[in-house]
């Protein structure tokens, strides 16, 4: 029997398209489901302010990274997303 992993009810899923590394951050009830804002905050937190979003998010296209807002505790592979898009990061200095 395959053991399934549980996910938060609402979360940001980010994947590094080159390495396959993934991040999952729960989205609290008080946060807006604004993908760009969530990605900007994720990049700031994860890279300690040294990297920021380079340009705009690219809906349904991949970049160095791909982010999705997942709802209802669905697995990242479910294909049912609130919003998604690829993006690149650049140094802040």
Image: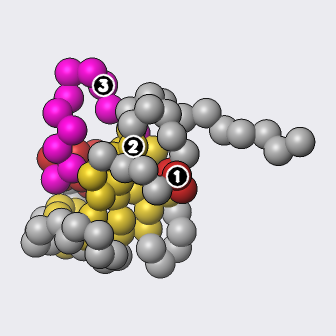
Q: Which mark is residue 78?
A: 1
Q: Residues within 10 Å of mark 1 (few under 14, many from 20)?
A: few
| Pointer 2 residue | 70
- Which quadrant holds the C terminus? bottom left
Residue 84, percent across and down? Answer: 29, 58
Determine the image quadrant of residue 91: bottom left
Which of disc 3 and disc 2 is earlier in sequence?
A: 3
Q: Is residue 89 left or right of residue 2?
A: left
Q: Residue furthest front?
A: 80
Q: Is residue 4 left or right of residue 58?
A: right
Disc 2 is placed on an element classified as strand
Q: Nearer the viewer, residue 79 or 64?
A: 79
Q: Residue at x 89, y 42 (%)?
A: 1
Determine the image quadrant of residue 2: top right
Q: Which residues are magenta?
A: 25-36
| Pointer 3 residue | 28
Residue 46, percent across and down? Answer: 34, 50
Q: Nearer the viewer, residue 79 or 24?
A: 79
Q: Are marks 2 and 1 in contact (CB under 8 Å)?
A: yes
Q: Which mark is residue 14?
A: none
Eyeballing the image, is 9 above or below 64? above
Which of disc 1 and disc 2 is earlier in sequence?
A: 2
Q: Is residue 57 left or right of residue 22?
A: left
Per the picture, the main secondary structure of the magenta-coloured stretch is loop
Which of disc 3 and disc 1 is earlier in sequence?
A: 3
Residue 26 seen in the current view: no
Q: Magenta span has 28?
A: yes
Q: Residue at x 37, y 50 (%)?
A: 81
Residue 31, percent across and down? Answer: 20, 29
Eyeballing the image, is 62 above or below 57? below
Distance from disc 2 to disc 1, alpha carbons, whole Å, reads 9 Å
């Amino acid at each position: 029997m395959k053991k399934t992993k549980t996910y938060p009810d609402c979360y940001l899923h980010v994947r590094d398209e080159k390495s396959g590394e993934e991040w999952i951050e729960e989205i609290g009830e008080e946060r807006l489901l604004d993908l760009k804002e969530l990605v900007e905050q994720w990049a700031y937190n994860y890279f300690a302010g040294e990297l920021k979003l380079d340009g705009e998010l690219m809906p349904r296209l991949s970049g160095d990274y791909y982010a999705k807002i997942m709802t209802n505790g669905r697995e990242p592979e479910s294909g049912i997303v609130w919003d998604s898009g690829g993006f690149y990061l650049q140094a802040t200095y």
